Image (spheres, rainbow, N blue to C red):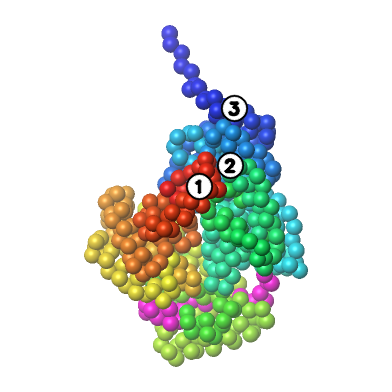
Amino acid sequence: MSTSTAPAIPTAQAAFLTACREAIGSAHVLTNPSDTAPYLTDQRRRYTGAACAVLCPATSDEVARIVQQAVQHRIALVPQGGNTGLAGGATPDTSGQQALVSLRRLNRVRSIDPHNNTITLEAGVLLAQVQAQAHAAGRLFPLSLAAEGSCTIGGNLATNAGGTGVLRYGNTRELCLGLEVITPQGECWDGLRGLRKDNTGYDLRDLFIGAEGTLGIITAAVMKLHPQPAARITALAALASPHAALEFLALAQRHAGPLLTGFELMSDFCVRLVGQHFSQMRYPFAQPHAQTVLLELSDNESEAHGRALLERLMHAAFDQALVEDAVVASNLRQTAEFWALREHIPLAQAQEGLNIKHDIALPISSIGHFIDATDAAIARAVPGARMVTFGHLGDGNLHYNVQAPVGVDARQFLAQHQAGVNRLVHDSVHQHHGSISAEHGLGQLKVAEAARYKSATELHLMRTLKHALDPLNLMNPGKVIG
């Protein structure tokens, strides 16, 4: 009678796991498949990896000790926050040789400084908790994403997340003043300085923001806070084309200046798709329009002041024939309904079936021409394909997605057309001097694509930086740069 035994754990890996148990406690070194499974598949279920362990440190010092042991035993590490990424950046490979480092237990708000308008917090704090802590202190933390109830500030920093408030407040990079980072050698760089001006050398902070854990592990940050606005005034405006939307954006910026905090574009098919799958989401106009803009003003004076400003803006937009119809939210409930219409687009897409997604950035002035040219090219390549075009028009970020034609099996559509559509879209983005990744990062999804469009000089500089900081290639290998 033969007996089966579990495969032997390599000596270096076994020694690494023993050292990690001593460093952070056995209860926080997960190796049972039922315990590790929730960490190993990305949010879109595009990637499922394997790991020798999921490590759950609770302090920056514990992270440092894990990295030191990883260096000693040559174990690659994959940092992870809330596991809400959309490019596979926080998912390990399938070898089972890498260790995943979950930062969810680093979840303390260390301090709030209302006079400096800053909050110092650890990487595992949920974005929604940052917003709540700021609100309790009479301040605003303006980063806002669909995943804010589950994504972490460390993940937001690692991917330089954008969201709906970039037009006024900037993306995550602009909201960060200082970082604490565990280097690939296991040393702690304490850059938690809440300074707006610091010209004392290289800007190390910006090296790590957007690097997706490939240059070190962010463990804490100093983030900017802002005064809470006295009022939010929200409206939906119907327009004939993206070109009209761009003219409307320019008009809104002239009238409202920095009070304009949101300017979201939604194509007709987007809002129809939401209504089809979420019947409670009511489109407020009597007839369909090619484009709908959701705009929001944040007024620090009063609601009356903000509404008067918006009324003047709308009068000017109608006078110039930029807007075909409009409705202004009369209360907070209606404001929430308007934003829900925008936020349910990805959910409606998922209900409709698999689709080809693109997170792209373009010069704002090029967006109308890009949509015209690329829509026409896709129509020629895939007759009947349905375009789900929406995004943050005010900062040039489009979610430019392609849904299968009616009646076509979605999986078959992806298998047959995804590579060709991606190349067509990305080539068009490049021709319009844009970026193939705006706010989701490269992860493992777009490493090869990014290399295709970057110059040899840019790739050389990136690889030089990676090798200089992480010569053993133990920090999230295979992500961002090949």
Q: Secondary structure at mark 1?
A: helix
Q: Give the distance between the C-alpha atoms of the residues marked 1 and 3, in whole angstroms.
A: 26 Å
Q: What is the quadrant of the N terminus in the image?
A: top left
The residue that appears at 54% across and 45% down in the rendered structure is: 470
For discs 2 and 1, the disc positioned in front in the rendered view: 1
The disc, 2 or 3, on the residue closer to the chain's N-terminal end is 3
Q: Give the distance between the C-alpha atoms of the residues marked 2 and 1, in whole angstroms.
A: 21 Å
Name the residue beneath numbered marker 2.
101
The residue that appears at 59% across and 27% down in the rendered structure is: 15
Write the start and end of the magenta stretch as one range.
Answer: 226-248
Q: Is residue 75 visible?
A: yes
Q: Secondary structure at mark 2?
A: strand
Q: What label does residue 467 carry, if any? A: 1
Q: What label does residue 15 carry, if any? A: 3
Residue 345 lies in quadrant: bottom left
Residue 435 appears at what percent x and percent y? 42, 63
For discs 1 and 3, the disc positioned in front in the rendered view: 1
| Residue type, mark 1 in image | His
Q: Give the distance between the C-alpha atoms of the residues marked 2 and 3, in whole angstroms.
A: 17 Å
Q: Secondary structure at mark 3?
A: helix
